[in-house]
Image (cartoon, grey):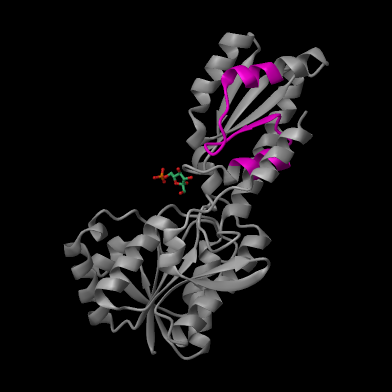
Amino acid sequence: MQRIGILTSGGDSPGMNAAIRAVVRKAIYHGLEVIGIKRGFNGFIEGDMEPMRLGSVADIIHRGGTILHTARSEHFKTPAGRAKAWENVERFGLEGLVVIGGDGSFTGASIFHREYGLPVVAIPGTIDNDISGTDYSIGFDTAVNTAVDAINKIRDTATSHERTFIVEVMGRDTGFLAIAAGLAGGAESILIPEYPFSIEEICHKLYKGYRRGKLHSIIVVAEGAGSGLEIGKQIKERTGFDTKVTILGHLQRGGTPTAFDRILASQLGARAVELLMQGATCKMVGMAAGKIVETDLDRVLGQRKTVDLDVYRLASILAI
Ligand code: F6P
């Protein structure tokens, strides 16, 4: 193997740059050439690709976002789009591809591998942490810390004004981010798509707290569990409590990556290069029980990662 490509795809996540750096430097260390593909699969289709050198990844380990830019490519979902990408694989002489992203990106990579046989290694990079085959995806830890920092600040003003706050966090259709941020932030309630809840029950909990002198509350809502604004409105109507809503939104996707995410990204990036050199055809690298592991990409895509409901229940017990 002499030349590999690398791209970032889907929603960006802090630590993607550290992963790019690791792939580029590890590959060059072993004498490989690396072609950086811009704007995810869109740049792959359009041939927006250029060689990366040691200096191309200087001074990026601490930066959020992705220097390669990213996109959710509709065109790559079509056979015509993938045929164009294959032309660029041949034009640039790529013998392997590293894809950093989430499950949508991995699905595209897997189909492309099946159709054209290009070896692919996927690296999980999403703040949602919803990829099976790894305990953590790059960016999750940073996003959790960003959300906790926001909750801490909201708690200050919630206490001063004796208010109920709804904090809506991202996570797509899962509650990984909400559970982690809610537990670490000491939220009174955490609403996730995986666990049924009723507004009545939440209001009951709020009243219970109020009766024993609790004058402020924080409720973390995963975006997949419902609209924070709507939930806030209903709680206000039922309880009459002064209720405010904060939607953290895309700020959870930015910022300097935590040391954990940088280390994870460095290890996964390096392992991805080793796997391609060893002849892997379609794998994902991940971390399980503290060890760097690899899993068949199709197995990853065939399994749904589930939240740890014991941790979820613990958060609820501790918030009483
Ligand atoms: O998958 C990452 C994520 O940030 C989700 O948490 C969120 O639902 C989605 O992407 C937002 O996507 P977009 O960047 O298209 O607004």
Q: Is residue 67 visible?
A: no
Is the residue 228 above or below the residue 102 in the image?
above
Q: What residue is rendered at 59% in x and 16% in y?
A: 235
User: What range of the chain is rendered magenta?
Assistant: 178-205
Q: What residue is rendered at 64% in x and 68% in y?
A: 263
- Spot occupied by residue 104 in the image (x, y as percentages of width and height): 38, 56
Q: What residue is rendered at 34% in x and 53% in y?
A: 72
Task: Give whichever of 274, 63 is nearer the camera.
Answer: 274
Residue furthest to the left in view is 80
- Spot occupied by residue 41 in the image (x, y as percentages of width and height): 31, 63
Determine which quarter of the picture holds residue 1.
bottom left
Left/right of residue 307 with respect to residue 212 in the rendered view: left
Q: How many marks?
A: 0
Is the residue 259 above or below the residue 272 in the image?
above
Q: What residue is rendered at 53% in x and 53% in y?
A: 305
Determine which quarter of the picture holds residue 166.
top right
- Spot occupied by residue 125 in the image (x, y as percentages of width and height): 50, 60
- Spot occupied by residue 28 in the image (x, y as percentages of width and height): 49, 85
Residue 152 painted magenta: no
Ligand 1 positioned in quadrant: top left
Left/right of residue 167 with respect to residue 171 in the rendered view: right
Is the residue 148 above or below the residue 118 in the image?
above
Is the residue 231 above or below the residue 139 in the image?
above
